[in-house]
Image: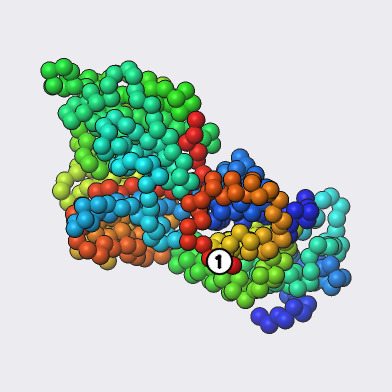
């Protein structure tokens, strides 16, 4: 129903316009008038904004300057290119550990065991209470959790944080038990459960945790299967990889990403990148959705890692560049490249990201 | 396709629909194109409404309606071109994006606002979507005062409320255009 009492456009049109604004502009628009202040916090609007942003995959990368031993963050996406990114509002030096549906889980660098959940686009953050069950630093071998997972449910605006790792008993050796600490945003409490695992995890395995269908997923170091944590019942299980992935060797690597809400495995060999998507989660049926020729980027193949994707494009990172591959017209494009020599490769701390209005407040 | 806002002539033999703008001007349009306008589609979905009935579009000016029809006609053509062929699909998609960009580029602020109202009233989802994105692009770096003038909105915050709200989102004001 068009009501011209409050301005030129009816409310439903205003929502359509505001939902397409970049986050900063959206927040400025809250000061236009009371109606707009209300509209942008409206539940329907938040859902609309989040649905639109899902189509814009982003990559968050830590760029460290060799000369300055300081690092900054950048954000790369198709719509707006490269933009500076800051977590200064946390007022702490942090490392990004996991990214899910617009929220980040960051650990404090000076204070071990201190974790923040934040929405870097809206600048909201929440300091997680320390777990009282057991000191969080009792993990083996270095006091840090091996696996850090963030599970954010967009529709309910609730999230869970998972810290998991082998337990270090008093004598400083691992006793084989695998501890899992789960933080629930609703109760604002940690809970703990114990299981037995025998996997190891590479750096990329740990960075690329995927939350779909109510569960967190990690590739294991042996690349033999996917480790799944069902957060509804706190159970670990294993899921098979696509049959055709075969054995993994130096020239044949696999990575776990999300693709439009589904689990996806990307396999990179000398000349090809195969993309599988788990279209039927219950039946565990993998579909090979694309075979991408890597001829154009031949020289980069040994050091390239896929970071973020949708059905339309794949973002990858090398030591010094962030590239995007558009699947519909098979075009490769360089989105970002490091100017000076960098100490750490870009892929080392690159995370898939998207901009949402997920709120992390209690 | 020459069209200076004049009544476009329909294909011979195809079914057509008559649309009447707010000033009484009648546009005869191919059925497939008319059905892009969900409001028109709903009008005929009603039992007993014959296709000969003139659809009254009281909230749409003839200028806006002419542009809407031109866009929808082109969009229907492009959709017919794409199919299973990936290459043709991609080309059609690029052409549609070019069409949208051209439409937006040529419009003044007042023109684009009028088109948005028309696309909203006529319920044309794709058209409303790219028009809203275009307006968003035009205002995204503008000052709050500019936005108020553009959308014809009054500042109904008290001075204290306005200051409080501004402080809440102070970080969003770094680097904004002056008016």
x and y, in percent, of residue A197 in the image: 23, 24
Task: Tell me the residue at 31%/59% (across/down).
Answer: A322
Q: Residue at x 54, y 36 (%)?
A: A155
The chain under label 1 reads B
Pick the quarter of the image with the N terminus of chain B.
bottom right
Within 10 Å of disc 1 (Cα), the crowding (few <14, some 14-19, many 20+) is few
Does residue A241 appear left or right of residue A172 in this picture? right
Residue at 64%, 54% in the rendered image: A32
Q: Which residue in the protein does label 1 denote? A: B178
Establish if A311 lies above or below A360: below
Q: Which of the 4 image quadrants contains residue A98?
A: top left
Which quarter of the picture shows residue A283? top left
Residue A15 coordinates in the image, percent (x, y): 64, 51
Whole-percent x, y for residue A211 in the image: 40, 37
Q: Secondary structure at mark 1?
A: loop
Q: Residue at x 63, y 64 (%)?
A: B146
Q: Nearer the viewer, residue A284 or A216?
A: A216
Residue A14, by quadrant, is: bottom right
Nearer to us in this view, B91 or A190: A190
Left/right placement of residue A352 relative to residue B19 reads: left
Q: Quadrant of the C terminus of chain B?
A: bottom right
Work out whether B24 lies above or below A62: below
Q: How is the image coloured?
A: rainbow
Name the spot of residue A104 as percent of width and height, x first.
39, 41
Q: Is residue B128 visible?
A: yes
Q: Is residue A129 above or below residue B52?
A: above
Report how many numbered discs are placed on residues in the image. 1
Between B177 and B91, the residue placed more toward the observer is: B177
**Residue A284 shows up from this direction:** no
């Amino acid at each position: 129903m068009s009501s011209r009492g409050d301005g030129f456009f009816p409310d439903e049109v205003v929502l359509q316009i505001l939902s397409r604004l970049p986050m900063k502009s959206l927040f400025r628009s809250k000061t236009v008038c009371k109606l707009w202040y209300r509209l942008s916090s409206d539940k329907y609007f938040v859902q609309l904004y989040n649905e639109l942003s899902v189509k814009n995959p982003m990559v968050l990368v830590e760029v460290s300057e060799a000369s300055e031993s300081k690092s900054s963050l950048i954000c790369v996406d198709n719509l707006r290119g490269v933009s500076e990114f800051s977590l200064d509002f946390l007022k702490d030096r942090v490392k990004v550990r996991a990214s899910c549906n617009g929220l980040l889980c960051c650990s404090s660098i000076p204070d071990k065991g201190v974790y923040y959940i934040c929405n870097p686009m809206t600048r909201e953050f929440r300091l997680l209470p320390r777990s009282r069950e057991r000191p969080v630093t009792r993990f083996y071998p270095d006091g840090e959790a091996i696996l850090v997972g963030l599970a954010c449910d967009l529709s309910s605006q609730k999230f869970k944080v998972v810290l998991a790792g082998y337990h270090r008993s008093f004598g400083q050796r691992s006793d084989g038990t695998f501890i899992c600490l789960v933080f629930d945003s609703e109760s604002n409490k940690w809970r703990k459960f114990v299981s037995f695992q025998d996997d190891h995890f590479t750096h990329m395995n740990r960075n690329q945790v995927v939350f779909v269908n109510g569960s967190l997923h990690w590739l294991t170091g042996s690349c033999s299967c996917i480790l799944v944590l069902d957060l509804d019942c706190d159970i670990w299980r294993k899921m098979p990889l696509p049959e055709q992935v075969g054995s993994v060797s130096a020239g044949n690597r696999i990575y776990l990403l999300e693709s439009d809400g589904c689990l996806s495995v990307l396999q990179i060999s000398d000349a090809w990148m195969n993309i599988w998507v788990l279209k039927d989660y219950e039946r565990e049926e993998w579909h090979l959705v694309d075979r991408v020729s890597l001829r154009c980027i031949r020289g980069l193949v040994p050091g390239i890692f896929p970071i973020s994707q949708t059905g339309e494009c794949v973002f990858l990172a090398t030591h010094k560049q962030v590239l995007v591959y558009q699947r519909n017209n098979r075009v490769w494009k360089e989105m970002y490249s490091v100017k000076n020599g960098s100490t750490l490769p870009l892929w080392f701390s690159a995370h898939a990201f998207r901009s949402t209005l997920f709120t992390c407040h209690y | 396709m020459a069209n200076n806002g004049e009544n476009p002539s329909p294909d011979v033999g195809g079914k057509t629909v008559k649309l009447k703008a707010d000033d009484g001007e009648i546009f005869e349009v191919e059925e497939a194109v008319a059905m892009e306008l969900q409001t028109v589609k709903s009008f005929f979905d009603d039992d007993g409404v014959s296709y000969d009935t003139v659809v009254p579009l009281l909230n749409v000016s003839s200028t806006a309606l002419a542009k809407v029809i031109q866009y929808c006609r082109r969009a229907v053509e492009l959709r017919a071109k794409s199919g299973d062929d990936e290459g043709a699909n991609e080309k059609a998609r690029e052409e549609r994006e070019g069409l949208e960009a051209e439409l937006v580029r040529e419009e003044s602020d007042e023109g684009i606002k009028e088109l948005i109202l028309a696309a909203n009233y006529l319920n044309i989802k794709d058209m409303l979507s790219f028009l809203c994105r275009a307006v968003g692009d035009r205002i995204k770096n503008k000052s709050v005062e500019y936005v108020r003038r553009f959308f014809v909105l009054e500042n109904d915050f008290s001075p204290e409320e306005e200051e409080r709200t501004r402080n809440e989102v102070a970080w969003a004001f770094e680097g904004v255009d002056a008016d």
